[in-house]
Amino acid sequence: VISMGMLTPRKFLQKRKAPLDADQKKWRGLMKEIEEAGSAVSVLTNKRINDEDLPRDLVLGTLVRFKQLKKWKYVSEILEWLRTQNWWDFNEMDFLMLITAYGKQGDFNKAERANKFKDAEEIFETLLNGGKLQLKPDQKMFHMMIYMYKKAGNYDKARKVFALMAEKGVQQSTVTYNSLMSFETNYKEVSKIYDQMQRAGLQPDVVSYALLINAYGKARREEEALAVFEEMLDADVRPTLKAYNILLDAFAISGMIEQARTVFRSMKRDRCTPDLCSYTTMLSAYVNASDMEGAEKFLKRMKQDGFKPNIVTYGTLIKGYAKLNNLQKMMEIYDQIRVSGLKVNQTVFTTIMDAFGKNDFASAVVWYKEMESSGIPPDKKAKNVLLSLAKTADEQEEANQL
């Protein structure tokens, strides 16, 4: 009790929160109104109709705070409304923020997002063609359009925007090339863009190296992945946590345990503390190398280091035992999931169904139905696995019915 009392900061040492100034109170109040109404347009329109004071600083403060909180729905609504207001000088930064807000709002392939994506395209086209606005898209705006096309899965348009930068005299940066590298699935294309970036006189950053290593790792080209990793260290580029996890994943996919261990140790050396994702990825390196004894030992270490396994961690172990056809150990891990209170996901159910189904189709059907009864609708992969397990005509008929 005395020790805890001594640890309690004295009142004169405690930092007092600075009182909110009048402007802060106003924009916080406006934010609260918008969030309660669920719509920025209705609140702002009512204020204009009722001739309430709506100074530029108030709107700007509210807008910036919503941006900081990543509440992109309100950011886009406010900016869309401001575009229609004669009293607001809608400038280049406003256009950039609006396109950014569109880009941050989810999956563009969904119907409710399609209009937003078209709006961003229209804004960008207007700026490119000059129009009534004497504004030209800058580097950041080009980057955002490449990012948006990437999220929409329209890689051809992303490449065209990239080419357009040079045509319009907009300088390309390492970030530009990284954007292109990030959506290429073929390691040859990633390597080609990487070489193109270096020929342009640009220095690769940690993201560039991580993307190239990831591409080589997924293509099971371990030697190239390792060579790039060493090149990165020679260039004195130190990975961030996210980049480290990408590096780990690249080696883990190929079951390159020693290389993955080197990366994992380097994280601590560089004062980059591994997170749950790092530990789970390291665990998958053992699993992909079919070293389940090493995987179990690493799981114990993970727990000792204070990390609680999640469903992905357990799913990785289940995948490993299923690969070795060790159904008993696989079910022991499944029981651990149940005891821990975690919810089993599609991946775990599909792995177990596949493992049992290779020996007995009826067991696969049981697990398929178990997935459905657990409130998890089987995805395309689960359905394809069930169909592939059906050998006889009767089994194929039952699989098709399910």
Image (tube, rainbow, N blue to C red):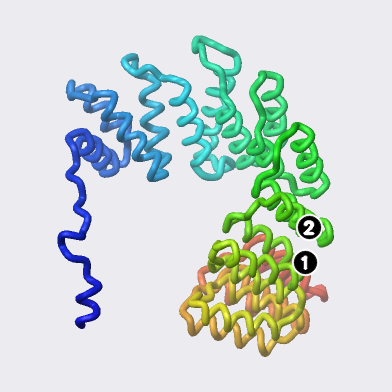
| Residue in view at x 21 percent, y 66 percent | 9
Q: Is 299 drawn above or below residue 279 in the view shown?
A: below
Q: Residue at x 72, y 27 (%)?
A: 163
Three-letter residue code for mark 1: Ser
Q: SS of the residue at dot 1?
A: loop
Q: Horizontally, is 252 left or right of 192 in the view? A: left
Query: Can you name the residue that lies furthest to the bottom here?
Result: 328
What's the CA distance linking mark 2 and mark 1?
Answer: 10 Å
Three-letter code, disc 2: Ala
Q: Along the polypeptide, which appears first: circle 2 or circle 1?
A: 2
Q: Residue lying furthest left in this view?
A: 11
> Is any atom of residue 26 visible in this view?
yes
Q: Percent position (x, y) of residue 95?
A: 47, 25
Depth check: give the residue in front, 11 or 293.
Answer: 11
Q: Position of residue 383 (x, y in %)?
A: 69, 65
Please indicate, yes or no, whether residue 126 appears anywhere in the rendered image. Answer: no
Residue depicted at x 82% and y 56%: 224
Name the residue at 42% across, 40% down: 72
What is the quadrant of residue 56 in the picture? Answer: top left
Q: Which residue is mark 1?
A: 254
Tell me the residue that label 2 is attached to.
225
The quadrant the N terminus occupies is: bottom left
